[in-house]
């Protein structure tokens, strides 16, 4: 049986002297349509004195009903939280890593609006996509979202399964993005976004082949062309990623 996420990593970092740790996670990275979304959940010593909400885990392991049920408890448990989005147009312009950084900065700014300044960030995974490249780096660009605050970023593989703050960020981001995709589905019916959330499901691919992309699609992704392949051909467009 899988152990639920705990706060051991966050507690150890707080013990080093930081006042607030931000757990962060992204959803929508591998979708063909819609934004990439980053959740940011702040915890402090006072947060860790309260039990982690029962049932909290990586959002991908929770049903839609379970996420809806646990969301208020998660939002109430953390010190503060925020969600940031980067649009399909921004993904096309910045690339997925640049878009993740943009969404992450927006999530941090929203979380810090409660009054806390974040200097310690715990990211799910093995890659630090939040820290901008050095100015002499080939990929360095002016970042309008950069607030100039120096932050230490630590990464942790399967952080959304191990760390409660990252799991909380995952749930909050997933809920926010799912709502946006439901609204987008109402504007662009046919792609099935209310259920597939912009990922490359069979109904989504079939509609892309039938009518082509709309303004919610990531045009830089390898989308199927209209009538380019028969339905059920097994063609898989875009980058391969787990749904998040």
Image (cartoon, rainbow, N blue to C red):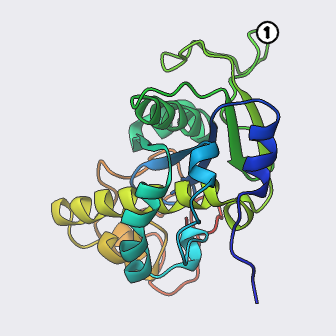
Which image quadrant: the C terminus?
bottom right
Residue that numbered label 1 is attached to: 136
Is 92 placed left or right of 25 in the picture? left
**Between 54 and 103, which is closer to the camera in this rendering?**
54
Is 152 placed left or right of 76 in the picture? right
Specify whether residue 127 is in view.
no
Residue at point 49% right, 21% down? 145
- Residue 27, above or below 242: above
Q: Residues within 10 Å of mark 1 (few under 14, many from 20)?
A: few
Residue at point 71% right, 22% down? 139
Is 155 placed left or right of 39 in the picture? right
Which image quadrant: the N terminus?
bottom right
**Between 79 and 94, which is closer to the camera in this rendering?**
79
- Residue 55, above or below 111: below
**Between 125 and 186, which is closer to the camera in this rendering?**
125
**Between 211 and 157, which is closer to the camera in this rendering?**
157
As helix, strand or loop, the secondary structure at mark 1 comes to: loop
**Where, by quadrant of the figure, is residue 210 drawn?**
bottom left
Count of marks overlaid on the render: 1
Q: Position of residue 11 (x, y in %)?
A: 75, 48
Q: Position of residue 169 (x, y in %)?
A: 54, 54
Is 38 placed left or right of 20 in the picture? left
Q: Position of residue 122 (x, y in %)?
A: 70, 44
Residue at point 43% right, 72% down? 70
Residue at point 26% right, 65% down? 182
Q: Position of residue 141 (x, y in %)?
A: 62, 15
Specify whether residue 223 is in view.
yes
């Amino acid at each position: 049986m899988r152990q639920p996420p705990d706060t051991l990593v966050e507690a150890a970092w707080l013990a080093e002297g930081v006042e607030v740790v931000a757990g962060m996670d992204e959803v929508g990275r591998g979708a063909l349509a819609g934004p990439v979304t980053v959740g940011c959940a702040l915890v402090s010593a006072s947060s860790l004195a309260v039990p982690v909400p029962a049932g909290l885990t990586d959002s991908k392991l929770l049903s839609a009903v379970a996420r809806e049920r646990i969301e208020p408890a998660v939002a109430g448990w953390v010190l503060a939280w925020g969600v940031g989005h980067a649009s399909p147009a921004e993904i096309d312009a910045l690339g997925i890593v640049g878009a993740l950084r943009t969404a992450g900065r927006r999530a941090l700014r929203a979380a810090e609006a409660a009054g806390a300044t974040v200097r310690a960030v715990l990211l799910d995974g093995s890659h630090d996509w939040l820290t901008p490249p050095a100015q002499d780096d080939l990929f360095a660009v002016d970042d309008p979202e950069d607030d100039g605050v120096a932050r230490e970023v630590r990464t942790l593989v399967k952080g959304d399964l191990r760390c409660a703050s990252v799991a909380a960020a995952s749930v909050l981001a997933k809920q926010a993005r799912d709502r946006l995709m439901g609204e987008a589905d109402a504007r662009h019916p046919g792609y099935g976004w209310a259920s597939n959330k912009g990922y490359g499901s069979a109904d989504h691919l079939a509609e892309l082949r039938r009518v082509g992309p709309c303004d919610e699609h990531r045009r830089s992704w390898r989308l199927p062309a209209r009538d380019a392949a028969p339905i059920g051909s097994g063609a898989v467009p875009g980058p391969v990623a787990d749904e998040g």
